[in-house]
Amino acid sequence: MEVSWGASGPEPGDNQALKPCLLRRNHSREQYGVAASCLEDLRSKAYDILAMDKSLAPITLVLAEDGTIVDDDDYFLCLPSNTKFVALAGNEKWAYNNSDGGTAWLSQESVDVDETDSGAELKWRNVARQLKEDLSSIILLSEQDLQVLIDVPCADLAQELGQSCVTVQGLQNTLQQVLDQREEARQSRQLLELYLQALEKEGSILSKQQESQAGFGDGGDAVDTGLSREPSSEIALSSQILTALKEKPAPELSLSSQDLELVTKEDPKALAVALHWDVKKTETVQQACEQELSLRLQQVQSLHSLRSMSARRDSLPGGQQNPKRARQEPA
């Protein structure tokens, strides 16, 4: 689907930094490197470099990847360096088809990479739409979703959210801060666990010197008994959630709120069997997940409360905000 942009921007003679671009004709394998300060400058150089007939003016510049018409200098400046453009002359149209689609000049290896990128693009666009509907959902995003939005080029994310590049850059900085805070919390918890394990190990060495062999055997039987009671029901957690629970030092920080809710609803014994843990450790992890879920929900409620207070303040009538002027109107 072609998207048209309004024409506005600086003249080619303005003193601006040059942006490196890749330029080619439609269905052509040869592409040329061009440095231009604005769209008009790029069009002017396209006539000479691509040997285009000036009687076909004006030419149209579109993105090689999807045929988006680029006719706005602000959008042009937001595009990353070495963006690929196709120059269309006269009534020539960019069209995608399975045989080339503007990509027949690429190698098969590049096509495979593009297919992989399409899946990643669909992922970040879905997350971006979720964030656009409710900004407070940033608290509920998993670390993977946060990283996906951080890695998206600023210009692409700005177009999807309908915001300026400056606003989106600030949003990405906020997402990075949230991700850093979760990482710091994970590292702090990991250090605490190492400290507790060291204390437990030291206490275990001292207790072994005082306990009898029989008492130690009873303790081992108790642990084995807890593991041997395998419930017949199966758990509903995905392999991705189980992997996070096993491998992450603080898994509750890596999971989304929906995943946290699923973990807290699982039977501790069934979950212990799936993770090959003892029941006590499983219950501890479930409690941590429940606390993290409660904290996120409290943060969301706080955001909604602030929004409601702001909306009520903005909705106050002008008469209530300036009562002195209201008394002067009857006279």
Image: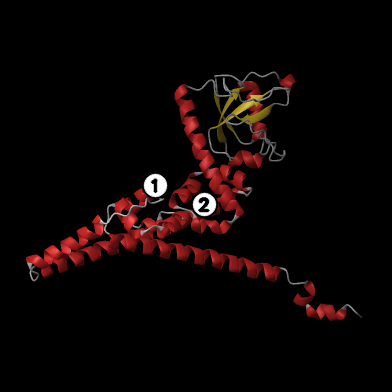
Q: Quadrant of the N terminus?
A: top right
Horizontal and vertical percent position of residue 144:
44, 48
- Can the viewer see residue 154 in this picture? no
Residue picked out by circle 1 = 240
In-front residue for pair 34/266 = 266
Q: Secondary structure at mark 2?
A: helix
Left or right: 197 in relation to 254: left
Q: Quadrant of residue 66?
A: top right
Specify which label sits upstream in the sequence, 1 or 2: 2
Cβ–Cβ under 8 Å for marks 1 and 2: no
Outermost residue to the front: 232
In-front residue for pair 311/238 = 238
In-front residue for pair 195/200 = 200
Horizontal and vertical percent position of residue 95:
64, 25
Left or right: 232 in relation to 13: left
Q: Which mark is residue 172?
A: 2
Q: Quadrant of the C terminus?
A: bottom right
Going by the numbered disc 2, the residue's amino acid type is Gln
Image point (50%, 67%), residue name: 298
Image point (12%, 63%), residue name: 217
Image point (66%, 39%), residue name: 73
Q: Is residue 120 above or below residue 215?
A: above
Horizontal and vertical percent position of residue 308:
64, 68
User: Mark 1 Cα within 10 Å, few/some/many (few <14, many 20+)?
Assistant: few
In-front residue for pair 58/107 = 107
Cα distance, mark 1 to mark 2?
26 Å
